[in-house]
Image (cartoon, grey):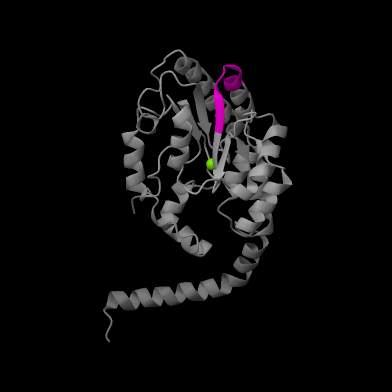
Amino acid sequence: MTHTPVFRLTAIAATLMATSMLIALPQAASAQDAVPQNDLLNATLWMQKSVEYKANTLAIYALAKMQLDAALADKNWTAIPDEQGADYSGKPAAIILDADETVLDNSVYEASLIQRGTSFSGKEWTAYVKDEVTKAIPGAVEFTQYAASRGVKVFYVTNRTKEEDPATLENMTKLGFPMGGDVDTLLTKGEKEDWKSAKGTRRAYVAKDYRVLMLLGDNLGDFVDDYNGDAAARMAVYEKNMSHWTKDWMMLPNPSYGSWESTMFGNNYKLPADEQRKMKIDQLEGWKPAQ
Ligand SMILES: [Mg+2]
């Protein structure tokens, strides 16, 4: 095979670069070893240590409180017109909140992953849940207590599992969340056969007996079941539901994880972190400076 001059020059440049990288390698490698790369770092620091994050969640819960007052004054209000069915205006009022990163702050778990240089494990997550060290997202306890004080039933639709249900119930009770009294308001994944990761069946379950005034979550899947498409499909779902956002659907910020991130690597969690990172970088829309 013959190379054109351009290719030969490129090959020479590549050899020179490789040589200089080899010379620089020992230092670069030791620097990497000392401070390993982890995509969770900034997001976890922001959620755990910044006033900016806390003020954000306070603002969303303050808006939710105002919107709840508006909803209670309007007997035709429902946040889930498709799942609510007919003749709902006489039903008692309810709201549905997701748990993790909506009302519960798991930043100590994320921080632990970064500090130990490891990644999510379902078994370890369950152990963490059973430790009952989860804290509340700022504004969440006050908002749910306010809703309960107005006679609104507060449901939590979470993909924590049936096995994790008792510890979650205890943890949330200790934090001061209203937990439903003799009504099961903590609806975990697998508690009933058709309660899978998609939450539509559980929203419909609540809607049978209640008029659902508001949904709160940190993930598109807390509002709709078609959340796992590619970025364009997710954007279309967002736009289709524009009348709900900030009215009766409230989205909390979660820069750590979620379907927004996994869609960037085709929801393939088995890919090595480096490959996931490459796919994420490839999808960035970047400014190209003039040469
Ligand atoms: Mg969540």
Q: In the image shown, does 184 or 224 lie closer to the viewer?
A: 184
Image point (51%, 25%), residue name: 94
Image spot of residue 131 (x, y percent):
73, 47
Q: What is the x, y in percent for residue 227?
A: 40, 45
User: Camera-side residue: 34 or 219?
Assistant: 219
Is residue 281 at all visible to an observer of this figure? no
Q: Residue furthest top?
A: 73
Of the pair 262 and 210, the residue shown nearer to us: 210
Q: Is residue 212 left or right of 291 when viewed as pictured?
A: right
Quick check: which quadrant has ligand 1?
top right
The image position of residue 30, as x and y in percent, is 65, 67
Task: Describe residue 2's horizontal placement relative to residue 249 as left or right.
Answer: left
Q: Is residue 248 left or right of residue 40?
A: left
Q: Residue at x 59, y 25 (%)?
A: 144
- Tell me where the magenta segment starts and ends, as one range: 146-155
Query: Residue shown at 69%/50% (left/top)?
Result: 128
For residue 238: magenta? no
